[in-house]
Image (cartoon, coloured by chain):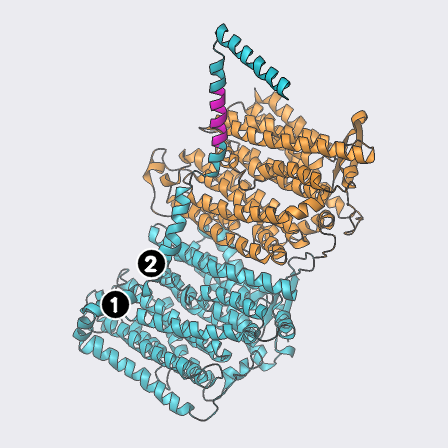
Amino acid sequence: MILIWFILLPLAGGVAAWLTGRRYPLLSRCVALLALILTFGHALSLWVRSTGIAWTGNGDGHRAWLYDVHYEWIPQLGISFHLAIDGLSLLLLLLSAFLGIMSVAASWTEIRDRTGFFHLQLLLVLTGINGVFLAMDLFVFYFFWELMLVPMYFLIDLWGHENRHYAAVKFFIFTQVSGLLMLIAILGLYFMHGAATGLYTFDYMELLRFQMKGSASLWLMLGFFIAFAVKLPVVGVHTWLPDAHTEAPTAGSVILAGLLLKTGAYGLLRFVIPLFPAASRDFAQVAMILAVAGILYGAVMAFGQTDLKRLVAYTSVSHMGFVLLGIYAGNMLSMQGAVMQIICHGVSTGALFIIVGALQERIHTRDMSRMGGLWSTVPRMGAVTLFFALASLGLPGLGNFIAEFLVLLGTYPADKIIAAIASTGFIGAAVYSLWIVQRVFHGAGNRAASERDGRPTDFSFREMAVMGVMMLVLLWLGLYPQAVFDIAKHPVESIRFTYAPGDNR
Amino acid sequence: MIAMNDMLWIMPAAPFAGFLVLALAGSRLPRKWIAAVGAGSVGLSMFAALFAGCSFMSAPPGMHAYVQVLRTWIDVAGFSPKIAFYLDPLSVIMVLVMTVVGFLIHLYSAGFMRDDEGYARFFAYMNLFVGSMLTLVLAEDLLLLYLGWEGVGLCSYLLIGFWYKDEVNGYAARKAFVVTRVGDTAFAIGLFLLYSNLGTLQIQELMYRAGQQWAPGSVLAVAAAALLLGGAVGKSAQLPLQTWLPDAMAGPTPVSALIHAATMVTAGVYLIARTHVLFTLAPAVQAAVAVIGAATLLLAGFSALVQSDLKRVLAYSTISQIGYMFLALGVGAWSAAIFHFMTHAFFKALLFLGAGMVIISLHEEHNMFKMGGLRTQLPLVYRTFVIGALSLSALPLLTAGFYSKDLILWEVWSSKSGGPLLWAAGLAGALLTSLYSFRMVFITFFGEAKTKAGGKPGMSMSVPVVILAVLSVAGGFVEVPVHFFTGFLAPAFPPVQSANKAAGEIILQIIAGIVSVSGIVLAWFLFLRSPHYDKTLSQSGFGSLVHRLWFAGWGFDRLYDVLIIKPFLWAAKVNRDDFIDLIYLGVVWTSAGINRFLTFTQSGKVRWYVTGVAIGAIVILGIVVLL
């Protein structure tokens, strides 16, 4: 039951919010918030308890599962409802509940239309995401993978901005097509494993023992990789992202950037590398080049944007490049860095999207050429934005720096040239991050934006609370990151071990 | 006796605490309180630094350093940087200069920024700066040093763009941050290299291992030193990354004094001195340090000679004086570089604070040619400013600047890796220095008054300036006649590799003295007695060309604009809509086209359908029969 709560709580919360939403929108918000706080508390209690659990396995290929539940479902086809978590999943579940709370709180005044239904969709997405982080059966995994999409589609299509239909359809088609490739790969793996061993199963832990060789494994690996690459996103298949992020409502953007992209990173770590270690090693060079291309391309694209939200969206392409790089560089430093980046990017970019949403709520535009000089009217907002811009450019003392530094430190022994080129992403990040602060808050005031609606109001207490918590998290991760590294250590170690058994770094 | 080992943290922590208070509650505090918190927190760390310095001198600790390990920052796969502070003779000098000058400038700012609406914000940023700077110089680990390094860069950005309503200031701030970040990135890559090959970033251990494992001149040592040099060049505004510093003068003048003259810009000097083992292992890079220093001191000296903005003269002068420090580092005269860092901090802070008082009493007038005659209007400022200018020009025997610059010139001459050529560059720079310093003095304070000065500066501004004036003179006597300063630093650095021990120091000193004085006399002649010579010279064809070139800092800005900024902007703009998306749009258009084609076949005309069925049948039959 311990693990089922992660699915039941948001699901039940969503339904309850939907039912109450029609009459009492405020109650609906509170119900959604409560369900997510309970989920978060549950995850937190597991974390606290996990510190007392004796870990098994030390880089010898064994996984250290914290909890593992197994229900028969369709035994004839080898499908079972198998959920398990290790430190990696637990971190992601914490992030999911945390960002869920933040996005409900951030949409408190933004969403006034069909409030209950909105919260149902929001919590359904989170249910799907939690399922993805829990599932240890490929069939169940695929089920949750698809479950994330539909409510996300509705979030964009129903509560989005001007161009929402286009963005929603584009998002859906990209993820659906790549998801189908993964389905083919899952079936391929299922049948090849069955043919080789006589045991037809979708169970992840069974399939882990199956070491496939030859070109088949490369093709199957690519099937998974492409699905995760679209989500991550890897440069080249990223073009759904700026549209979807820009058009989605604030909460949608936060969930997209903070969690949906992370399911791609999680998939690479959980499935692609352990299931196909040899093929992944062969592919590593390509992946790392794609990663560096993404880091630089995303940075240049971000700088070129005039739409503030689009700018923030492109920074994700750049930052997630570090995750891809860290995963494929394949040592403890780089992989721990990638895990850290997953969390820190979720928080910092989520916060930036909340800020953009709050700005749009006040001045009704996302066009940066119509902003400027807002610091004197909304100083708190300016200071908060500055903080997250600094996180985004990798200022030491904040979590993002730890993450990117470790990724590059680990990449260096793997490939010096790639590490050096990727490091120049620091410069690009400085350019676009400071540009945000300049265009929006510095300079002389811009009449077009401010006069039409009078003076915009500064962050309210609720908004400052949301932002304050997120700032504290980034500071904590920047100064005391060890707690995250400790809990991620064993899972990451065993993933790294399957990937590069000889190397002990 | 209190254990110093446990007290090092107070120095950076006090200003950080001040920052937190001001950032969280600054808008609600009365101005007096803001100033008290801002200056008080720096004062606290000054007392801690003085205390540490005294106990260091009275009873030198074992291994010549106090070490305080607070905790392990990260521990991943053997990479375990610590948050730890390390106080050796080098960092004693650094923290003393930083806290004393920092405290004086905070006091001064309490008066200078009196009427600014961003009073709390100003002191918050300044405190954050001092905390970061102290972290930088006290860090025992290169990763913590890097935290301080980026922190001071951030504060520099924040304070250059302090008056954010003007776009120009924002541009200057971003330019400073991005240009130094180019260097920082090289520095970061250097850290990756060092850790990957030597397995630690703890400075002392790293230096030890480098000496053990790397042969002098080996590729890794050269690469590591070159990458660290990249970082140093960016922060210290040396060629080729010097372009940001003149623009950085957009910030309030106390900021220019503290960050862009006395402390932060010398971080590169500190970094090289701190990792001097690496540079000794890479003679080629060390030679590059000397050449960069010599070239920078000359180029910036020429630029300083033609500026009209008072603060820009001082900015180019700072670049030039740090060039001297690099020159000294490049020939292995580590202590001399640090000595010049100290005296420079005193007299340059003094000059900037004096300039600030001039500017504020002339209502934000920066142009020297609109000043003049201030000698009688602002007598205190005049007297202290001249002391600063004399120290900058290295007036023999009396001023601190003479002793430090002379030590550098002598060691450049006598060092194995120095020589007459580098010495001549330094000497030429000395002539330029006194020339531009007194050009500035004569134009600003002599001649006829062109603008009437407003009110006189208050006590909180005058007192720091007077103290700095005293230090600008007395600061030299820590070395002469008893070699106290270099003796104190001796445990931190190896002695200068001297090739030319023959007596001659006296002769060189006399030459340097003559050069310094003749520069002043020449300035008097050119800019006060017969200014028409200068005018005709700068208006002649070639003269005006050179004038414009020097004025624009040798055209580096334009070069980078054409080579880097324009192409980048173009690439960002032209691809705003992401060409990769065209691929997917292509898929969309293709499928839409096929769709239109296929709907065309669904015309509802039976004849067409029959024909289609017949053709299809024939084709299939044909395939079956033929294959």
In the image, what residue occupies the spot 46% across and 78% down? B328
Whether the magenta-drawn stretch holds residue A423 is answered as no
Shown in cyan, the chain is B
Magenta range is B585-596
Tell me the amino acid under the disc marked 1.
His
Residue A51, percent across and down? 75, 48
* Farthest right residue in view: A198
Tell me the amino acid under the disc marked 2.
Arg
First in sequence: mark 2 vs mark 1 = 1
Foreground residue, A249 or A457?
A: A249
Q: What's the chain of the residue with tag 2? A: B
Q: Which residue lies under the disc numbered 2?
A: B558
Chain A's shade in the image? orange
Residue B415, percent across and down? 48, 84
Displayed quadrant of residue A7: top right
Label 2: state its secondary structure.
helix
Quarter of the figure with the N terminus of chain B: bottom right
Q: Residues within 10 Å of mark 1 (few under 14, many from 20)?
A: many
Foreground residue, B122 or A351?
A: A351
**Residue A446's disc number:** none
* Farthest bottom residue in view: B503
